[in-house]
């Protein structure tokens, strides 16, 4: 029998009674199962000390049992009781069952994952754990050196297809040398053999069509997606059909293979669809307005495959930039008379042909200064103002008549309601008549001179 606990009651009178309980149920002495010896001591004070010890036979089922004692005593004629705290007993027993599991679940394991094989036994203390992996011809590879034998955990890092197989955990009880074992199958999900086939496989020309087929192998069902070089999805399924190809269609396409049942399991394969042909110039800097002796950049951009070369018919510093099937050339050159007159020629060539285009340069005249224009306007205004002042001054002095001079009869026009007619006649007709002469030097009569001295103004 195993000693479970001891219960002591001090300084009580009359002597108390002690009982024992297991999981709330009172225990009674039983041969070979329960023994409860007790001692009673009378102290010098006349009070009593009572001690009781519980011995019991325990099994693995008692590993979680709770024990306590109860002291029953009398106080003022009433029976009372007080309980002790609950205690648990450590029970040692051999393992009867072993469990081996894959974490995370084997159905979700994929290449590149870290996996734990956890081995558990129901013995106390825990037994010593050993791990093995079955190889060919039923040979077992010892993996114990990779495991924590105390906790029963085998860590597998960055697993792959070859990590799949049957694993075994063995336990050894050092008390009775009893050995238990448990097996588990580890399946590492994978995708392999991703292959893209292009039909036709011959060089492609503009206007051709092509079919891309993608295939792969995996222990689980697969889905296929096609993406362009920017990562955008362009189609689903294991085939992609491209028609009426152009240089602009030339690109790198990728087949993305996905296992829907295993999150994160995917692989990609890239294929280049290259459309061949002679170069095509798609942009030039023409016409270009320039000034004499100015340093300018001439630009020529073309598209072609195989990659073309760009040549200029004028001397300068050229820089080329390549992006996919496009090539751009910038020529830095100083404008002179010959360049301004003849322009420049961009020539793009590859093994399949040549393309060229002319860049026209136009002379950009220097615009007149705004200041000069403003000064000219001010000068014109001043001239007009001076002329106006002179004319006004002469008019005030009578040097300039209001009407047209000429011989005419002075007849009073018919009066109109909406017009005011003012006739101004000279007061010195007789005097002026003597002064005015004709062309032959003779004096003219006053009647012949009246028409010249009458000013008619209407307002």
Image (spheres, rainbow, N blue to C red):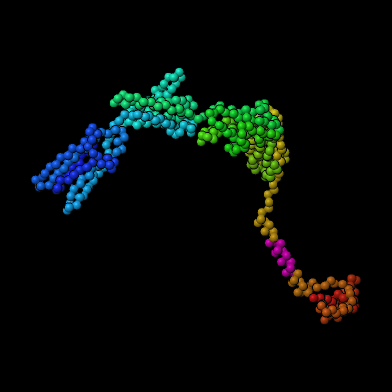
Question: On the rendered structure, is 148 left or right of 404?
Answer: left
389 drawn magenta: yes
Residue occupying the point 74% across, 66% down: 387
Residue 152 in the image, given as x and y percentages of width and height:
36, 30
Residue occupying the point 67% across, 44% down: 290
Q: Is residue 321 visible?
A: no
User: Quarter-wise, where is residue 406 in the image?
Assistant: bottom right
Query: What quarter of the picture does the N terminus occupy?
Result: top left
Q: Nearer the viewer, residue 431 or 105?
A: 105
Residue 267 in the image, given as x and y percentages of width and height:
54, 32
Residue 79 in the image, given as x and y percentages of width and height:
20, 50
Query: What quarter of the picture does the C terminus occupy?
Result: bottom right
Q: Main secondary structure of the magenta part?
A: helix
Whether residue 452 is situated above or below residue 81 in the rendered picture: below
User: Quarter-wise, where is residue 102 in the image?
Assistant: top left
Q: Nearer the viewer, residue 336 or 415?
A: 415
């Amino acid at each position: 029998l195993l000693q479970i606990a001891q219960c002591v009651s001090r300084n009580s009178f009359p002597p108390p009674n002690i009982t024992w309980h297991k999981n709330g149920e009172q225990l009674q002495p039983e041969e070979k199962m329960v023994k409860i010896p007790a001692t009673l001591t009378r102290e010098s004070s006349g009070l009593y000390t009572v001690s009781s010890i519980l011995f019991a036979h325990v099994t693995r089922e008692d590993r979680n049992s709770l024990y306590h004692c109860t002291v029953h005593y009398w106080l003022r004629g009433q029976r009372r009781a007080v309980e002790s705290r609950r205690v648990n007993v450590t029970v040692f027993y051999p393992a009867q069952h072993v469990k081996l599991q894959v974490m995370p679940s084997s159905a979700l394991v994929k290449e590149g994952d870290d996996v734990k094989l956890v081995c558990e036994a129901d013995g106390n203390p825990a037994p010593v754990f050993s791990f093995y992996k079955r190889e060919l011809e039923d040979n077992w590879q010892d993996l114990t050196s990779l495991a924590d034998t105390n906790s029963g955990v085998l860590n597998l890092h960055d697993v792959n297809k070859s990590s799949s197989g049957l694993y075994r955990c063995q336990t050894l009880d050092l008390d009775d040398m009893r050995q238990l074992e448990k097996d588990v199958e580890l399946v590492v999900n994978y995708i392999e053999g991703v292959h893209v086939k292009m039909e036709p496989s011959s060089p492609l020309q503009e206007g051709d069509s092509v079919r891309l087929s993608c295939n792969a192998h995996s222990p689980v069902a697969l889905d296929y997606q096609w993406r362009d070089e920017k990562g955008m999805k362009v189609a689903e399924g294991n085939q992609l059909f491209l028609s009426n190809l152009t240089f602009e269609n030339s690109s790198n396409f990728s087949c993305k293979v996905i296992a829907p049942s295993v999150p994160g399991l995917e692989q990609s394969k890239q294929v280049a669809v290259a459309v061949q042909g002679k170069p095509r110039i798609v942009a030039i800097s023409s016409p270009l307005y320039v000034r004499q002796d100015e340093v300018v950049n001439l630009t020529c951009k073309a598209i072609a495959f195989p990659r073309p070369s760009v040549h200029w018919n004028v001397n300068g510093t050229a820089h080329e930039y390549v992006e996919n099937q496009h090539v751009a050339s910038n020529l830095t050159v100083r404008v002179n008379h010959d360049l301004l007159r003849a322009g420049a020629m961009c020539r793009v060539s590859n093994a399949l042909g040549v393309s060229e285009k002319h860049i026209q340069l136009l002379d950009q005249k220097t615009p007149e200064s705004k200041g000069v224009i403003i000064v000219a306007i001010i000068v014109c205004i001043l001239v007009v103002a001076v002329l106006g002042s002179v004319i006004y001054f002469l008019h005030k002095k009578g040097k300039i008549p209001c009407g047209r001079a000429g011989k005419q009869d002075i007849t009073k026009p018919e009066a109109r309601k909406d017009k005011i007619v003012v006739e101004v006649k000279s007061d010195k007709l007789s005097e002026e008549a003597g002064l005015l002469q004709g062309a032959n030097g003779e004096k003219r009569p006053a009647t012949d001179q009246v028409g010249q001295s009458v000013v008619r103004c209407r307002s």
